[in-house]
Image (cartoon, rainbow, N blue to C red):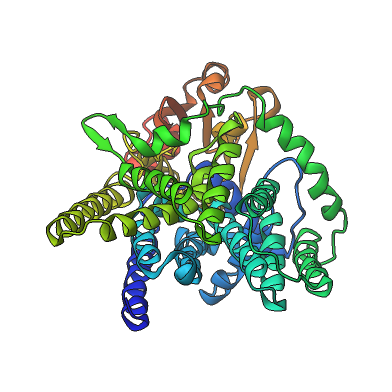
Amino acid sequence: MNKGAFFSLFAMAFLLAFGLRLGRLDLRPMHHDEANQAVKFGALLEHGEYRYDPADHHGPTLYYLTLPAAWARGQKSLAQLDEWTVRIVPALFGAALILLFAFLADGLGREAVLLAALFAALSPAMTYFSRFYIQEALFAFFSLGFALALGHYVTRPGLGAAVIAGVCGGMAFATKETSIIIFAASGAALALSAPAKKSFKPGHILLGTAAGAAAAVVLLSSFFTNPAGIVDSIRAFKDYAVRATANGPHAHPWHYYFTLLGFSSSGGLIWSEGLILILGLGGVILVFARAREFWPRYIAYYTLITAASLSVIPLKAPWDLLPFYAGMILLAGFGAAALLRAPKSGWFRGAGALALLAGCWHLGLQDWKANYRYPADPRNPYVYAQTTPDFLRLVDRIHSLAAVHENGRDMPVKVIAGPYEQWPLPWYLRDLRRVGYWTDVSSAGEFGGVAVVIASQENAAALDSALGDRFQAEFYGLRPGVLLTVYIERALWLRFLGVSDKSD
């Protein structure tokens, strides 16, 4: 395949990925993790405030890189933000991840890279988790960028590759604490793939390291306004190590990611990215059986070590698979290209091409179903503690009540629920100015003058007693198996219905 054909087809694969990731970004309700990040970004947007939190939220790259999107849309406050503004950032990085594949055209072969780009564009998991306002799409991009730049420096030592590796490494470190796994996996992969010995210049390594440190320090210190953030980012490794190895609600067996990608069936819907996994496994076998070149072996070792490291950690969320799955997709492209080249008969080659075409059609169909038809459906295997569409009915009801309340957006609202049940309410009620949050009824104070109370089920009994018959109760789903009770002041409820209160 000549360069012109390669770049034309590669551009088409990228545009396909771009379209799938950026379409209808407001279609799925905000996940509670997304809402938490978005509200934190709102503080940065409104007040320029950011402080690295070693206990939660991960690093600051997501927030700082969202600023241009908000500025471009003329949004200057949390209330003005919308799902499109925040989600476009991970969506762009999710699409840009495919552009990194092009740098392997010589190392893996143009056909392999082109097929990998197509697989990545159509992968339901890669698309779905690129449409989340969380760190993972950015982390996958910077992680792969670091690994590839490091490999390029080892094979062709130069200042440019050293600085790019440093910057990507620094950005990965400032994005998520699991960057330490990526650094270790990349180093181990280099050692195991036995690259040809080159003369490395200490100046290159020093400048590359300095570039990475500078990128991380600037962001973690909030542009030098919070130097403690740098120390906190180191301390955070201990906290995350404890949480990652604890047996909690998000602890899953070692095969969790592969089961998720391999096959799942629920409510008549069947899902599988088995094409990529099978071709990726074939690529791994081919690498260790025949390939002697540096790049195939390096990508294989990097992928296997990263996948093994993330799999042995009990704490897992489905989006954590992105860094190693990007490598698996590259290996799938390598395996698919070898499959198409292997048969001597044109008939077999044509049959192989048709099988790949059918597999890609299947991936594309699942991609559309996962992201556009069933984006919040529990039968979708990529859905994880997802906010239900029924919750949006609650949000609409609160705003409809505010529209008829005498104080409008100053309508008093009390939310009484544990932290897990409070989110994503702060995002969806961001335009209301008198919303307070408490974890239990005893700490919420008096309810005189309160128009609406939103409560978790564990607080419902106490509120039934405290509110009496002055409020009308309604029920809404938050997440599968999680309900919220909304208590509406009876006079307001009747006004909303257009009925006069006969008791007045």
- Nearest the viewer among 498 and 452 is 452
- Tell me where residue 24 sits by quadrant: bottom left
Residue 98 location, quadrant: bottom left
Quadrant (top left, top right, bottom left, bottom right) of the C terminus = top left
* Viewport quadrant of the N terminus: bottom left
Can residue 70 be seen from the camera position used here?
yes
The residue depicted at 49 percent of the width and 63 percent of the height is 97
Residue shown at 26%/59% (left/top)? Answer: 340
Where residue 226 sits in the image (x, y, percent)? 85, 59
Q: Residue furthest left?
A: 347
Work out whether 209 lies above or below 412.
Answer: below
Measured as percent of width and height from the top left, residue 252 is found at 52, 27
139 left or right of 242 in image: left
Please name the residue shown 51% across and 20% down the image: 468
Is residue 445 among what the camera can see? no
What x and y, as percent, mark residue 501?
Answer: 38, 34
- Up/down of 322 relative to 196, above or below: above
Callout count = 0
Q: Residue at x 40, y 47 (%)?
A: 280
Question: Where's residue 443, x and y in %?
Answer: 70, 27
Question: Which residue appears farthest toward the bottom when viewing the image?
Answer: 4
Which residue is at the front of the view, 224 or 361?
A: 361
Q: Is residue 445 left or right of residue 238?
A: left
